Amino acid sequence: MLLLFFVVAHPANAIAPQDSGDEIALKVVTHQLCQRQVVMLGESASHGDGHTEAFKVALVEKLVNECGFDSVFFEASHYEFININRHLRGSKAVSVDQVSAAIGGLWKFDQEFQPLVPFLLEKAVAGKIFLGGIDDQLGELGQDYANVVMIGNLTMVLPQLESQECGLALHRRIYSEDAEADGYPKSDRAEISTCLSDIRSYYAEDKSKDRTNDEEWLEMIDATQRWISRDSLPDAEQIVARDKSMFRNFQWLRRQRPRRHKVILWAATVHIAKQADPTWADHTGTNFGSFVHQEYGARAFSLGFAVLTGTYRRGHDVHDQLTAPRDSVEVQALGESGLDAVYVGPAQLKAMGTRPGAIFRHSYQTLKWSNFLDGVVVFRMEFPPTSKRQR
């Protein structure tokens, strides 16, 4: 595992420089989050921060091992993780590659992230944690179950002609880069909606004894239907509808664990914040995190990350972090301390009031950040993840 060398200031007690080190940093933030029921770990919308990833990996491991968190969900394929959990339930082998594929290309190729996958798989096989994805989107590279196998299994219950037409229409949608492109005509939307309704009726009326399996098919059908239904919406409304769907998927996953459980969610900060970025979506404040906080209140915690200097990845390119304004969260948090990282807790974030911060993405916005996050880890230096993608 990549070692982290930084120090974090505790909300109540500042840690002296001689106490610096990754163990101290993780201990402080773990202590803050340990008693919560739903902990949401954000990151920049560019998903290209290696230091942040490494910190989050170490934090997830400590929350699971030391605080009893028993569910880990990602902003990742709902369908792939349902299939993985079927395998685990049936004592079938699940590989690291399968879990990596379910998590998806935003993280699976990053060296800083990769140590987390075998850790999660080992715990899941032992029945100590439950894994899940909250995203309903199809078409992710390498997710052959969701894009191919699931579609084939769903459509096979239809009459032959309808099955072929539905399968082709879904294939065109899954592999189209633009929902309005010529390869995905609007007529396909109606075709898909109709056939998904027919498939749903089949599983809803199924009298087999395997109700768990049928309920999983119904869930995947409903999630696919929500994904398709967003194609007709303007971009801002699509963003809001996607967050609503992710929360519905989250609720479904939660119901699979009948006892009280503690959840870690890994996603972009724009999704997990207590309310949406006001420059994003439909400006209503509605996002995934707002639904979680409405339901869980003080038992939920939204943790953001920010950096003062360094570089980050966006797409395939590396960019320099913009110079932070003197009154920014980043400058004020780190101050003259010389510390490599500082944790800004709820009280400190509230006391900072309204000021610039590069927390949703690597550009500065002036907001009252305590309205959006419960805490922020500020690193002095960021670096892009090290890609292990095969060229």
Image (cartoon, grey):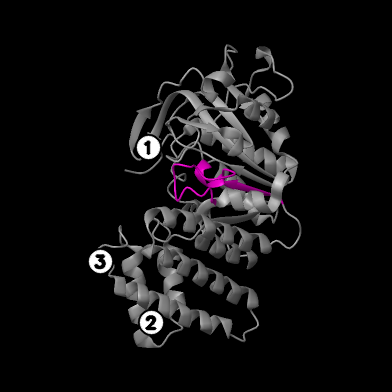
Q: Are marks 3 and 2 in contact (CB under 8 Å)?
A: no
Distance from the alpha carbon under mark 1 to that under mark 2: 40 Å
Q: Residues within 10 Å of mark 1 (few under 14, many from 20)?
A: some
Q: Residues within 10 Å of mark 2 (few under 14, many from 20)?
A: some
The three-letter code of the residue at mark 1 reads Arg
Distance from the alpha carbon under mark 3 to that under mark 2: 19 Å
Question: Is 207 included in the stretch rendered in magenta?
Answer: no
Report if residue 344 is visible in the image.
Answer: no
- Residue 83 in percent (x, y) is at 54, 65
Give the mark nearer the N terminus: 3 vs 1: 3
Residue for point 48% across, 61% down: 136
Q: Which quadrant: the N terminus?
A: top right
In the image, is 167 to the left or to the right of 242? left
Distance from the alpha carbon under mark 3 to that under mark 1: 28 Å
- Label the magenta part by its dominant secondary structure: loop
Query: For mark 2, what is the residue?
Result: 163
The disc placed on residue 183 is 3
- Residue 346 in percent (x, y) is at 67, 32
The disc placed on residue 314 is 1
Give the structural element (helix, strand or loop) at label 1: strand
Give the mark nearer the N terminus: 3 vs 2: 2
In the image, is 118 to the left or to the right of 37? left
The disc placed on residue 367 is none
Over which residues does the magenta segment extend? 262-287
